[in-house]
């Protein structure tokens, strides 16, 4: 029976949402997620508002600057600060992208790690270092990619190898699977079937931008498309009902509009409840 | 350097690929894109990264960006992104990295305003005062006597003497004459950011107040001594007026509360 750090349907908390979400409670949004890089070392009015949220909701950290595959050394002090931040706010788990965002300094966005055996070993070693510091499993996320430089194996095999080698957990981003299946021409359902069920900690779902019919960009700036909803449904069918978080970072709509997408997650979870591998769903 | 070049020799292939990928994103005019990636796909990365960095810079330095104008601002942004090694993992600190870049790496071009760094610093200061975490709280007597008690300051307060009136610079007033400007930026009682114009004399008062260990009276005596005004009653009264004014503004919150039984 898989165990999850949270349950139900969640929403990524942005600074722009602090005001709009002030009247929403945990019965509507089961859990939230923040980038620790936006909140560590932040006091004043923002720090106080944030505290009100972490006191009320279950929280996860979804990092952006760990740069787990980077040529640059791991920033140990930063990882310790993330750990302390999680303790201070009672944050349940830490997820990060299976990518890198620095090379001779931070670049603040995600680049693709070449899918090679050498890279698997390098990344797995660094994940273990992180896990030793945070004293819990790191949850890594499959990322959207627009290029696959130096590729020597398929993405799914790279992902599985890193998880096995490092003994970490997985944040499965369903939208990223769809985006990559379009950009790199593979079968999204086949990819989803190959994911080891017992490694999944939670799911992400989001909208993307269609640059061209064969080139999608993971912008988190639009509503979730129907084919991604279908893939979420398929994921539940394959792996059971899993806590799922909606990401919306740009063009943030009204709260009712956001809640209508959260409701779709809840509906799909309800429709799939009772499937093998599923956890209890307290939102139904 | 020798240590680094030694590492370069033994580094795995995928690391070399990653560095080449990153170098091209930072500076596509100098570094070619990886051979196995076509330009249409590489362009997605180039655009996402650069727009992201420009978003951070323009968000933190809106006045500067407007005054410098789009072409030059973009040029400076590209130079920052390609030359500066950002150490901070924290997004709100990118503006501090930019200040560091301006101090050490940026080279001024004809047409860049002389107050470039000072204006950037002032814009950064507003952000800093807004988000900097408070230190441990001290028990406060908000209505205590400012002369006999130890005055307590706002949890975040900074004062600087600028050579230009940076607080008055805007697109409409983009060529001010140099004019020493003592400016205090601080967190108000309601957590919003407050601004106060002052002078070099009272900036020194702020420095003494920051130590938060002497009574207001003793601080004023020391301030007068430092300024060669020992025994000047008018200057003493002027200093006291400033303390009271600062209390009204929320730069000074009150005095340290005396512990019962002390």
Image: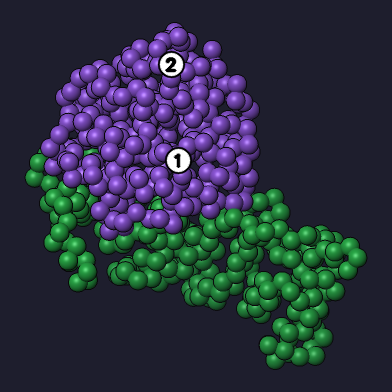
| Residue B132 to residue A96: above or below | below
In front of the other: A201 or A30: A201
Q: Position of residue A93 (x, y in %)?
A: 47, 37
Q: Colour of chain B?
A: green
* Label 1: which secondary element: loop
Query: Which residue was labeled with disc 1?
Result: A136
Mark carried by residue A278: 2
Q: Is residue B66 visible?
A: no
* Label 2: which secondary element: loop
Q: CA distance from mark 1 to mark 2?
A: 22 Å
Q: Position of residue B75 (x, y in %)?
A: 28, 58
Residue at 17 percent across and 56 percent down: it is B11
Which chain did the renderer colour purple?
A
Task: Judge the density around disc 1: few (<14), some (14-19), many (≥20) Cα neighbours within 10 Å.
Answer: some
Residue at 55 percent across and 17 percent down: it is A282
Q: Position of residue B191 (x, y in %)?
A: 66, 51
Residues indicated by labels 1 and 2 sit on the same polypeptide chain: yes
Circle 2 chain: A
Asked if residue A241 lies left or right of residue B147, the reply is: left
Residue at 37 percent across and 59 percent down: it is B87
| Residue B177 to residue B224: above or below | above
Q: Is residue B121 visible?
A: yes
| Residue B55 to residue A216: above or below | below
């Amino acid at each position: 029976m898989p165990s999850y750090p949270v349950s139900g349907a969640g929403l990524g908390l942005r600074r722009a949402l602090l005001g709009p979400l002030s009247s929403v409670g945990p019965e509507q949004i089961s859990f939230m997620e923040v980038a620790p890089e936006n909140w560590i070392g932040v006091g004043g009015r923002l720090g106080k508002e944030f505290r009100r949220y972490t006191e009320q909701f279950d929280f996860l950290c979804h990092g952006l600057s760990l740069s787990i595959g980077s040529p640059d050394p791991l920033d140990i002090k930063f990882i310790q600060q993330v750990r302390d931040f999680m303790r201070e706010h009672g944050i349940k788990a830490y997820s990060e992208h299976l990518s890198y965002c620095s090379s001779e300094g931070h670049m603040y966005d995600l680049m693709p790690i070449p899918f090679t055996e050498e890279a698997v070993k390098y990344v797995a070693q660094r994940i273990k270092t992180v896990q030793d510091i945070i004293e819990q499993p790191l949850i890594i996320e499959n990322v959207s990619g627009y290029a696959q430089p130096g590729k020597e194996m398929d993405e799914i095999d790279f992902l599985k190898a890193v998880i096995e080698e490092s003994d970490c957990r997985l944040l499965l981003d369903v939208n990223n699977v769809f985006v990559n299946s379009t950009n790199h021409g593979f079968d999204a359902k086949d990819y989803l079937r190959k994911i080891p069920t017992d490694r999944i900690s939670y799911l992400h779902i989001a909208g993307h931008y269609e640059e061209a019919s064969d080139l999608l960009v993971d912008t988190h700036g639009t509503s979730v498309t129907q084919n991604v909803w279908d893939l979420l449904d398929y994921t539940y069918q394959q792996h059971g009902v899993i806590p799922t978080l909606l990401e919306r970072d740009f063009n943030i709509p009204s709260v009712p509009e956001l809640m209508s997408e959260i409701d779709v997650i809840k509906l799909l979870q309800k429709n799939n409840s009772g499937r093998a591998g599923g956890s209890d769903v307290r939102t139904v | 350097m020798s240590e680094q070049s030694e590492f370069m020799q033994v580094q795995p292939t995928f690391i070399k690929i990653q560095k080449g990928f990153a170098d091209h994103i930072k500076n596509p005019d100098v570094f070619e894109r990886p051979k196995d990636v076509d330009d249409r796909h590489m362009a997605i990365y180039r655009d996402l990264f650069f727009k992201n960095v420009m978003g951070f810079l323009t968000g933190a330095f809106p006045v500067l960006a407007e005054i410098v104008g789009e072409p030059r601002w973009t040029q400076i942004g590209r130079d920052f992104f390609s030359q500066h090694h950002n150490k901070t993992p924290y997004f709100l600190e990118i503006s501090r990295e930019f200040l560091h870049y301006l101090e050490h790496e940026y080279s001024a071009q004809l047409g860049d305003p002389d107050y470039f760094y000072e204006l950037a610093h002032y814009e950064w200061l507003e952000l800093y005062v807004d988000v900097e975490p408070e230190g441990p709280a001290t028990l406060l007597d908000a209505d205590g006597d400012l002369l006999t008690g130890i005055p307590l300051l706002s949890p975040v307060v900074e004062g600087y003497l600028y050579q230009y009136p940076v607080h008055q610079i805007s697109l409409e007033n983009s060529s001010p004459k140099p004019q020493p400007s003592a400016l205090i930026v601080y967190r108000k009682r309601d957590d919003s950011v407050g601004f106060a114009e002052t002078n070099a004399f009272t900036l020194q008062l702020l420095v003494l107040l920051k130590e938060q260990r002497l009574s207001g009276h003793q601080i004023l005596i020391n301030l007068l001594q430092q300024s060669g005004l020992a025994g000047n009653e008018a200057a003493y009264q002027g200093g006291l007026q400033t303390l009271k004014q600062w209390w009204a503004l929320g730069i000074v919150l009150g005095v340290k509360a005396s512990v019962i039984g002390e």
